[in-house]
Amino acid sequence: MTSHMTGGAMIIDIHGHYTTEPPALQHFRDQQLAGLADPRRRPASTDLGISDDELKESVAPQLKLQTERGSDLTLFSPRASGMGHHIGTEEVGRQWCRVCNDLIHRVATLLPESFVGVGQLPQVPGVSPKNCIEELERCVYALGFVGVNLNPDPTGGYWTDPPLTDRYWYPIYEKLCDLDVPAMIHVTSSCNPNFHFTGAHYIAADTTAFMQLVEGDLFKDFPTLKFVIPHGGGAVPFHWGRYRGLAQAMGKPLLTEHVLGNVFFDTCVYHLPGIELMAKVIPVDNILFASEMLGAVKGVDPETGHNFDDTKRFVDQLAELSDSERYKIFEGNARRVYARLDALLTARGHPGRAA
Amino acid sequence: MTSHMTGGAMIIDIHGHYTTEPPALQHFRDQQLAGLADPRRRPASTDLGISDDELKESVAPQLKLQTERGSDLTLFSPRASGMGHHIGTEEVGRQWCRVCNDLIHRVATLLPESFVGVGQLPQVPGVSPKNCIEELERCVYALGFVGVNLNPDPTGGYWTDPPLTDRYWYPIYEKLCDLDVPAMIHVTSSCNPNFHFTGAHYIAADTTAFMQLVEGDLFKDFPTLKFVIPHGGGAVPFHWGRYRGLAQAMGKPLLTEHVLGNVFFDTCVYHLPGIELMAKVIPVDNILFASEMLGAVKGVDPETGHNFDDTKRFVDQLAELSDSERYKIFEGNARRVYARLDALLTARGHPGRAA
């Protein structure tokens, strides 16, 4: 593992999805969904027939960018928009989830220096998240994953399940705490024409989830539960004054006490002024480096000549960060939030810095 | 009219709601909604029995803050969370809308130096916005209003009506263009427990509406239509790189050409770093001063000792603004976007500055 020495840190990108999957995966999904209408079209097997070489080749573009941009390790999960919890039956969703997670496991096993797995859960609208415990345990124990993505709106944009603070969700939180595994709060695609997936649904969901946590008292019941809110926390840092004010008006403790012991934000914000704002208002202990490459926002920013999702450049430009703060954003916070990642890296001979 | 001389501008707050209404208004609403269950409880009359003195007294707290904080004029509309388009029947909604607008008209007539009216529309989930044209015309012609609030989600958080770019909305856009009246895109309360109204629904809706406009080509069909997206545009300025990148990936023109001729943001962002970011990424021509006082976020920020919603302080602290830019944010842009406001002020002997 090459350790790019930005603040002496290993550069851990905590938010990457497998968006360059071999075509066989999408073909399998087509067969699955075709099978809903015509059972004869169901896939004959969950063996996708993808060779190790094909897998390695499929992530070559990702690895090339990691090298070029200077990140060492990506926490890698199935394509977020592909989770599609609102599509098909529970049985089909469960099979799909296993197939996607297995593929991540294979990539992480083939290229352990570059990828560590994060899982998808077989959530179903209106079905208790209890149904995810088996797959969560499999992710951690059998596949060696260090986190999971938890969808706060399995309906894909209609929001008819209860808020994250409802006891409905408690079974999965209990298991997350038992396993010491954090959840990234991440919706999937939207089947609601009001919500463009990456431009509206993702960002609105991040904002909504945060406000649910402000309004509730979930972390009194689960003091060790950890959530990562991606895409810079949606609108939250931009409206930090609003959230501080609303919490105060509701008689809640300061947000630092009320939620920031448990809630973390990634740096998937695709311009420097956004990252600068985030670093100004969110405590450095709550910021985890991430880019969500490849795919969330593709292309080169004509204003900078660099890719929109090359977020490391933005963090590198935060001149006011001390070496120790830079270490936290790039490595230390990831190891603290993803305890199993820390254990894994330590076991591989890469201990973290003493706090 | 006292002109507080910040950049020599009249300070126009384009986003204020009547949140200190006399109790008789809420009593009327109670009777209306009780009447849905028991027709005998319907209000006997739409005459609320509120005297002019009571009205003046009810806005005294608002006027006091306007004076203290140095704003001259507020574009004043009915309480946003009170619109409740998802509540009751179309008939009840229409009556409620007229009563609320009439009250705004009375306040603006009693205190014309301090308030200019903006209307509520009798939107109903699943009902064509054509049904709002009559009230829109009444607002402009009979009540002298200079704008209206348009709810992009009349369902109150379930988002089952079409996106703003759908032809479903075209009849109301045609009338807005005919009348040269802008619409503020503003949701009402949420009946979905996932969405706290001011902390999630408002901000998510702002973000969602903007992305709908990026994804569509509405302003090709309505080149003179003007939308104000409140609360600083939701998450948009914070994720300006994401929106520029998504537009580019969709093959749209630059956002400046694609939407910023028609879309404007207010300054209802309740901390300095947020306003600083906004001024950095959003062209000054698209920023309109506003505070949404009283009520959106109450209380004093312990970090500054000033009220969260005293947004003028933040704009005043933007040292890099030229005098002419400051004039635009406080007055010039409001007069450009709200053409009828400009005409009204000019007729009263307060012409705007030449561009």
Image: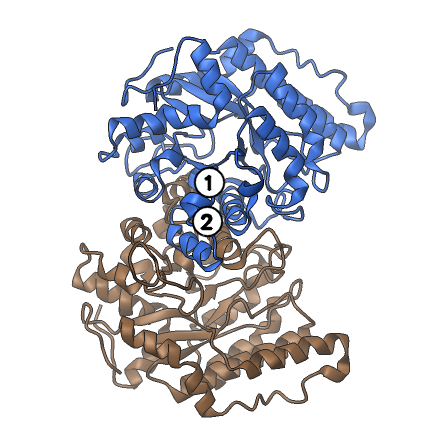
Chain colours: A blue, B brown
**Could you tell me which residue is drawn at 43 percent across and 59 percent down?**
B229
Percent coordinates x, y for residue A12 in the rendering: 40, 22
Q: Determine whether, in the image, residue A250 is placed left or right of residue A174.
A: left
Whether residues under marks 1 and 2 lie with C-beta atoms below 8 angstroms apart, the answer is yes
Residue at x 63% of width, y 15% of height? A142
Residue tagged 1: B250
Q: Identify which residue is drawn at 54% across, 66% down.
A: B81
What amino acid is found at the position of numbered circle 1 in the picture? Met
Image height of A257 relative to B327, above or below: above
Q: Out of B301 and B65, give the one closest to the viewer.
A: B301
For residue A73, which quarter of the picture? top left
Question: Is the residue at mark 1 from the same chain as the one at mark 2?
Answer: yes
Give the image location of residue B190, x and y in percent: 59, 59
Kindly tell me whether residue B155 is visible in this rendering.
yes
Q: Which residue is mark 2?
A: B214
Horizontal relation, residue B85 to residue B244: left or right: right
In the rendered view of the protein, which quadrant contains the N terminus of chain B? bottom left
Q: Which chain is home to disc 2?
A: B
